[in-house]
Image: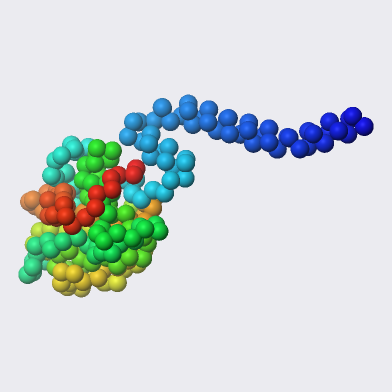
Amino acid sequence: MKGLFRFALFLTFAPLLCGAGFVVGYVLIVGLTIPQLPEWAQEGVTEWMLDIPQDTERSDNGSYGEGSSGSSSSPASQGSVEWHGYTGFESEFHGLPLVGPIQRWSAWYDKPLLGCVFHDRRYTTHTGLDFPVAEGTSVYTPISGEVVWAGENGPWGNLVVIENNGVQVYLAHLSGITVSEGDILSYGDQIGLSGSTGNSTGPHLHLGIKKKTGEGAYVWLDPQMFFNPDDYIYVGCSD
């Protein structure tokens, strides 16, 4: 009888003991592993392991060199998007590619949210801006010009590139594209829907600005140079 009682106790508490052992082992592994990572990666990995949603890409998307925090430009390779030499009217920037109200997860905001910035201190190779936003949000061109790329492009995911007067604007990680290569756009035209395609860990829009500086020479510009701080809500880089 005592044997049956002990066996019943074992069956009752065995799952609890196994669960406790798993938690202890998990904590030990995390505690030993995370400190070995670079400082910039530790918080992001911790957030991922705690199942906190992320919303940024994990790549510099074609730039090279570390750059420096606070710099307004960074070297750029030519990449796979060729220059068409288009020059037209209204080549100036007129604002952000998102229009409020903006939804992120279950919350709504009256302005676009700004996440990782150019050469962010936690992401120094980042050569654009990330705007966390719910998938399927309309994206608009902040500049007039010719669509020189509209389709999938490796780490960029679904990408639209608009060119005018020696500048290319990159709008990346889209869930859908509503323009075609060769289209001539006016400022404010819709180009697609936000998403999380390509090298991305959560829904967001990546905005990059690439400027030709000479024959075969290009740099990434800091898009914040073209915007007013009152146009967005800064939430910081989550990864």
Residue drawn at the location 26% of the way across and 58% of the way down: 112
Left or right position of 57 against 8: left
Image spot of residue 54 (x, y percent): 39, 48
Residue 153 seen in the current view: no
Residue 183 sits above or below residue 196 on the image = below
Residue drawn at the location 22% of the way across and 62% of the way down: 97
**Nearest to the observer: residue 32 or residue 144:** 32
**Nearest to the observer: residue 134 or residue 192:** 134
**By what rule are the colours in the image chosen?**
rainbow
Residue 110 sits above or below residue 25 on the image = below
The quadrant of the picture occupied by the N terminus is top right
The quadrant of the picture occupied by the C terminus is top left
Residue 188: quadrant of the picture = bottom left
Image spot of residue 223 (x, y percent): 16, 52
Image spot of residue 191 (x, y percent): 26, 68
Residue 163: quadrant of the picture = bottom left
Residue 143 seen in the current view: yes
Residue drawn at the location 68% of the way across and 32% of the way down: 17
Count of number-bearing discs: 0
Residue 169 sits above or below residue 221 on the image = below
Image spot of residue 159 (x, y percent): 29, 61
Left or right position of 138 against 78: right
**Nearest to the observer: residue 5 or residue 201:** 5
Residue 34 sits above or below residue 237 on the image = above
Residue 10: quadrant of the picture = top right
Left or right position of 63 against 155: left
